[in-house]
Amino acid sequence: MVNTLAVHRGGRALLLAAGLTLGLCFAASAQPAPTSAGPADPKLIEDLVAASRILADHGLLDGWGHVSVRHNKDPNRYLMARGLSAELVTAKDIIEFDLDSRPVDTHGLPMSALFTERYIHGEIYKLRPDVIAVVHTHAPSLIPFGDTKVPLRPMYHRSAFIAFGVPTFEIRERAGMTDMLIRNATLGRNLAEALGDHPAALMRGHGAAITAPSLQRVVSRTIFLSLNATLQADAMRMNAPITYLDLEEARLIEAREGHGLARTWEGWKRKAMAKP
Amino acid sequence: MVNTLAVHRGGRALLLAAGLTLGLCFAASAQPAPTSAGPADPKLIEDLVAASRILADHGLLDGWGHVSVRHNKDPNRYLMARGLSAELVTAKDIIEFDLDSRPVDTHGLPMSALFTERYIHGEIYKLRPDVIAVVHTHAPSLIPFGDTKVPLRPMYHRSAFIAFGVPTFEIRERAGMTDMLIRNATLGRNLAEALGDHPAALMRGHGAAITAPSLQRVVSRTIFLSLNATLQADAMRMNAPITYLDLEEARLIEAREGHGLARTWEGWKRKAMAKP
Amino acid sequence: MVNTLAVHRGGRALLLAAGLTLGLCFAASAQPAPTSAGPADPKLIEDLVAASRILADHGLLDGWGHVSVRHNKDPNRYLMARGLSAELVTAKDIIEFDLDSRPVDTHGLPMSALFTERYIHGEIYKLRPDVIAVVHTHAPSLIPFGDTKVPLRPMYHRSAFIAFGVPTFEIRERAGMTDMLIRNATLGRNLAEALGDHPAALMRGHGAAITAPSLQRVVSRTIFLSLNATLQADAMRMNAPITYLDLEEARLIEAREGHGLARTWEGWKRKAMAKP
Amino acid sequence: MVNTLAVHRGGRALLLAAGLTLGLCFAASAQPAPTSAGPADPKLIEDLVAASRILADHGLLDGWGHVSVRHNKDPNRYLMARGLSAELVTAKDIIEFDLDSRPVDTHGLPMSALFTERYIHGEIYKLRPDVIAVVHTHAPSLIPFGDTKVPLRPMYHRSAFIAFGVPTFEIRERAGMTDMLIRNATLGRNLAEALGDHPAALMRGHGAAITAPSLQRVVSRTIFLSLNATLQADAMRMNAPITYLDLEEARLIEAREGHGLARTWEGWKRKAMAKP
């Protein structure tokens, strides 16, 4: 049934009720593994590995964070590394998942060798057909904003997407006392709903989920969301009015975003891949 | 007599009075060296070396800090490097100590070549049978908390253990004016008593002692205790209420802590061991 | 007509009206490429490459920032890399531009492979014959100052030039809502006018443009403008009066500036060029 | 006459009036170069090179800072590198100076190839026979303290020497408007007088001069003076009373300081000398 879910990029299907049911029943079932969409574009795999390494090199992914991308041949599949420290990820560690975050093939690994919180990715891809790539990070500078609920505001053009809103997901409101992890499809859906139409959501006491229409942009957004938090905190301590980017400035920036990013990506990638 | 001390993991013997006497009389005695528990598990030694290097790589151990682990064959013995900069430690530098912090064999080194403050480790192991690994650090971000007595509170799931309390040891209350070092068993016991049942204690004007039920977790706790201090200080400057982890959230996190840490450890270790 | 523009170093021609016209008509025209001033001094090219790498090594240039230098044979030409991450720039990536920021020869590259914001450089060179080198940076520490309009003040001798004033360019005042980029000669001229006689100008929500009478000094100014911002923000939080450099102290420092810089440059260069 | 100056370690000659006269007349004279005290201990030279590299590796010396040590054969001579970026210093760059900061032999270099501010070192050695090593640094974290005159206070045992007082030298009080540099013996003496009996002095708008009874300790003091400034600024923002080290605690620490430093030095040195 998942394979027949019509996920149209650009549109937005109302899949909430259906997805909740699916998530719950698959979590408990022993159904056969989902079918593969076929081999992904090698360039996409290469970029996914680079994304993981670049974010590790920036101190934004450690052994617990992860980055994924939608499969180029099927919007109902996504690609993500097996549970592995971000700086160690290679092409052979990439696993294909369906949108219920069930692996197509674990390469012989037990399920416990996968990232527990892969539901963050699958559930966001379900609700947000426009999203092509997702990052889950514990970037330190974001934690004080998540814990205080002080809204992030866009300090400069590199973090313009913040103008579209970065809500904070309070897991207590949906699930009470937990170990904070997005351990199942229900919590994943709760997070995806809190994210809504926004580019990113902070997670109180935990980190953030960040989305974008491409791998390069989700990496860039993660880097600059984190940097913006540091700069905004600095500015807030200067006891002077702060001029944030206007929503219209942000729209004009985002409409052209990506030009220039390709060359920056080459610099980031070269530095990250040169690490031992 | 020390060898017959019944240290049961999981239980908690009331050894305060006896230990104080022992510590004092051994400190002044010329008794024979304690017997060895035999060769430790090579994997434990490898992990202890890695722990030292990882903490050095994170800027949390310098020439004055150290990490130890209880011997896998005898809870009345612990393993720690000879006095050496943390980034230089190798397997051959590891020395076995009894819980009075007397070396089994100094490998021909004079006693002055050992860490003066090894009593931090021995005295904590005596009072806390549940503790398997101990770190003593001068991590910079902890110093302002120790000097101001502002309580550390858990900012996010990675530092959840802080919810169990991190007291501050004021050496003046026990010993008046000193050179701040834990130079003998009595001061070590004072510190261990201030630590009590908590996972860590700050030491005013000095640093911290951190404990855990494994080497990997004591390394993780040291990294995130230090990071939490930075993030809490940042949040405290934002003039907004801060939602810390609830004690129940912390309990749920700690009950599962360790899953995922093994893979993070691999990333930390690879990076640290690649340093020249 | 551009080639005949008399740009005298040391003097200051009033080129505003003429330049505005030129910039606008060239932007829309399909005129032949400007003629070359001939091969630049290889040492100048080497220094330009080093400048790019040093600023990248200091975290002050990424894929979006750039540094340029006036051609040693013709003040109406300047040299800058093609659009490329600063840490990847080599001598063969350097392109010659006229002061309308038209390339003499793109080495077969499409115009989209050039830095969009090259007009920052060309328009400053037009209005400021004393300027020999220009940097455009998104240095993080400058963003809070640009967004709050808190004036930068000189904290110490290394950043003495700040005493001559660092205005903030508010693009909204000249062009309303934009994508913040200096995309054409008109915006470049607006920025150059806001810069006026000053050594540098912040750009609200964007970064800064920094000028100097040499490549080595523009690199040094970029490093210490950024560091001064961090130090000034720190000092402002100490709730005590701050003694900034006096204008006369700054004049005396700047009159001798450069002595000592050559040796520092060698250290910076060696470190930056050794990066993989 | 300088060669016959009786500088006794442990005592303190009142050389103010004589020194002032000497400094002024030598500055303008063409007297013969001072005689050499003979080859210095190669281990001392090796340590001096290491000191320079370690401080560079810690970001505390750049092209403008320097470290010196008194000659092991003659208290009236000191050793310091020719003007060179600290990370590039090797044994062959070390030059011998008399206490008027005149080089014994410039190795064929012009006087302009020496550090302009060498008078900081010579004049401190003159007034402080107890001082064996001197650092002049522009360490960033010290600048806000120098500019605000907020007194540095000792945060922890590693920076205990701060309890002995760190005055701030205000060059305007002695010389009015200057280019801030200690360009001659008179300014050097002014600074040395402001330093007085203290271990270090901040220099408003410039940096600091730090002294110690050995090279290893002056390096350690420079590292921890800088770190203490960061930590104290952090603590001051926590709106809670700060317990600094007591003067008696500091005395007890300093009386034993050095034990343990030798092993830390090995770690610092290995890391610094491994840099390309």
Image (cartoon, coloured by chain):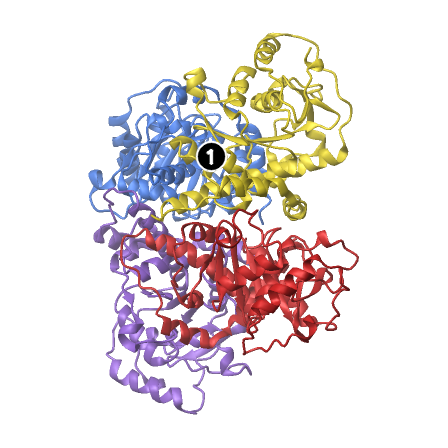
Chain colours: A yellow, B blue, C red, D purple
Quarter of the image with the N terminus of chain C is bottom right
Could you tell me which residue is drawn at 56 percent across and 67 percent down? Answer: C265
- Residue type of the residue flagged with mark 1: Val
Task: Read off the chain for label 1.
Answer: B
Q: Residues within 10 Å of mark 1 (few under 14, many from 20)?
A: many
Viewed as shown, does residue A215 lie left or right of B17? right
Return the residue nearer the eye: C134 or D204. Answer: C134
Residue A56 visible in the picture: no
Q: Which structural element holds mark 1?
A: helix
Q: Which residue is most to the right?
A: C108
Could you tell me which residue is drawn at 28 percent across and 30 percent down? Answer: B193
Determine whether C28 is above or below D132 in the image. above
x, y (%) of residue D134?
38, 68
Return the residue nearer the eye: C112 or A224. Answer: C112
Viewed as shown, does residue A262 lie left or right of C189? right
Tally of numbered tags: 1
Q: Residue under circle 1?
A: B219
Determine whether A33 is above or below C64 in the image. above
Image quadrant in which you'd find residue C101: bottom right
Viewed as shown, does residue C14 lie left or right of D219? right
x, y (%) of residue A62?
55, 35
Residue B35 visible in the picture: yes
x, y (%) of residue B265?
55, 33
x, y (%) of residue C64?
61, 51
